[in-house]
Image (cartoon, rainbow, N blue to C red):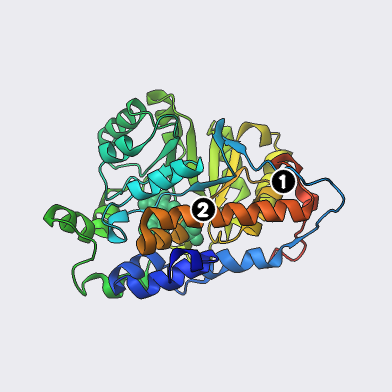
């Protein structure tokens, strides 16, 4: 279909499932074990209802917000997803350009297909990029990366902490040795892409613990965000250790199956932080399962500062390149604006907990 026939984000998924090779589709779409957490990431949103208010003069809607103090045209950022070149020959820079067109932040993956320089050069003046890092067993390697990204103008360090080992992604495992991955431009990329999971598993430090935050603080002035928090207990620890933000995330269901969806944990995390007097000290983001403007609205209502998105933009990028990603972001923006207007909210600050009914949210 032509791009203007694409009406919502699920359409991109349908197109991508047809045009991507089995290998890439499996890598992008897969999740751990029986994919229950992956499924819940979507279904949990369906258990939250809205409480629209009327007669509130919704002529003007301001969707803009700040993430770590940086302007964002609406409360969504592009999450880090490895190996962009499997889906598009230009890889992550396609997302960089679309993020700029829409005035939103991009979280650059440590395991990008593009080099750091390519992604830095693709950044336009004033554009905000965060850097997602896996802490290496060899701290000197991590230190060099951190110094490099700080010098190159990345605005925050997002440390992914939910991968002490790689999740059991069976779809991906089945495909892995079936053939060369697509979208590979040269031999260098081929080696890099084929080896990714193995490299990942061998290089990430499973001994990671909270002391690493002190070490990070001692070597960088960038704000520190911890990605992969899944309980109020750890959210409180992150705030106590002085992190600037947390991403509630089960890694798109790709790590521990039966880890709860972020949206379900969110109210408990906000309550836990509030009770501990730490809520003002840390920003809370969530990712997993975002497909609609109403999903973003629900997350903001329950206390998230912003939401991250992964797969849908990979599908948009793979099917239609930069124009596809821009179209996907426009759809989300239009949907979010419509939900704000129909709910009687003019600004992000108006989207408070009593704009949603979440009594059916918790599954247990
Ligand atoms: C990811 N994700 C991820 N996260 C991370 O911190 N580092 C990484 O390298 C990757 N790589 C990656 C690859 C692919 C193909 C996917 C689908 C995901 C997880 C990602 O940042 C995010 O947490 C989830 O993708 C969010 O869920 P949705 O939007 O995909 O449902």
- Residue 123, by quadrant, is top left
List x then y, in percent, for residue 14. Answer: 45, 73
* Residue at the disc numbered 1: 271
* Residue at the disc numbered 2: 329
Residue 34 relative to residue 276: left or right: left
Nearer the viewer's eye, disc 1 or disc 2?
2
Please tell me which of labels 1 and 2 falls first in the chain. Answer: 1
Residue at screen point 44% across, 31% down: 155
Q: In which quarter of the image is ligand 1?
A: bottom left
Residue at screen point 37% across, 64% down: 319
Badge 1: residue crowd in 10 Å (few <14, some 14–19, many ≥20): some
Mark 1 lies on a secondary structure that is helix
The one of 214 and 197 positioned closer to us in this rendering = 197
State whether label 2 is within 8 Å of ligand 1.
no
Residue 47 relative to residue 116: left or right: right
Residue at screen point 29% across, 72% down: 21
List x then y, in percent, for residue 86. Answer: 28, 60
List x then y, in percent, for residue 167. Answer: 39, 63
| Above or below for 196 versus 277 | below
Residue at screen point 32% across, 55% down: 84
What number is the disc on residue 40?
none
Q: Quadrant of the N terminus?
A: bottom left
List x then y, in percent, for residue 276. Answer: 70, 37
On the question of residue 251 being in view, the answer is no
- Residue 65, by quadrant, is top right
């Amino acid at each position: 279909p032509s791009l203007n026939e694409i009406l919502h984000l699920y359409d991109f998924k349908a197109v991508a499932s047809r045009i991507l090779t089995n290998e890439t589709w499996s890598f992008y779409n897969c999740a751990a074990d029986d994919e229950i957490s992956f499924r819940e990431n979507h279904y949990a949103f369906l258990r939250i209802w809205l409480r629209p208010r009327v007669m509130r003069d919704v002529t003007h809607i301001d969707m803009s917000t700040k993430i770590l103090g940086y302007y964002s045209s609406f409360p969504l950022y592009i999450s880090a997803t490895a190996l962009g070149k499997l889906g598009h020959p230009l890889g992550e820079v396609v997302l960089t350009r679309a993020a700029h067109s829409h005035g939103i932040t991009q979280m650059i993956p440590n395991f990008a297909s593009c080099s750091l320089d390519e992604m830095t050069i693709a950044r336009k003046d004033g554009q905000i990029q965060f850097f997602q890092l896996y802490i290496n067993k060899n701290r000197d390697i991590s230190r060099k990366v951190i110094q490099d990204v700080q010098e190159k103008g990345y605005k925050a360090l997002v440390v992914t902490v939910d991968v002490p080992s790689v999740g059991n992604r069976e779809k991906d495992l089945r495909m892995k040795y079936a053939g060369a991955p697509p979208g590979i431009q040269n031999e260098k990329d081929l080696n890099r892409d084929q080896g990714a999971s193995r490299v990942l598993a061998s290089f990430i430090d499973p001994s990671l613990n909270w002391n690493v935050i002190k070490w990070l603080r001692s070597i960088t002035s960038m704000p520190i965000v911890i990605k992969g928090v899944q309980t109020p207990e750890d959210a409180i620890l992150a705030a106590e250790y002085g992190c600037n933000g947390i991403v509630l995330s089960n890694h798109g269901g790709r790590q521990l199956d039966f880890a709860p969806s972020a949206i379900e944990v969110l109210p408990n995390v906000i309550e836990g932080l509030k009770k501990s007097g730490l809520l003002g000290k840390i920003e809370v983001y969530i990712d997993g399962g975002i497909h609609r403007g109403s999903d973003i609205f629900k997350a903001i209502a329950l206390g998230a500062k912003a939401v991250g998105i992964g797969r849908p933009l990979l599908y948009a990028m793979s099917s239609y390149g930069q124009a596809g990603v821009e179209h996907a972001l426009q759809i989300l923006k239009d949907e979010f604006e419509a939900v704000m207007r129909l709910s009687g909210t003019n600004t992000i600050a108006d989207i408070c907990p009593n704009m949603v009914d979440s009594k059916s949210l918790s599954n247990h």
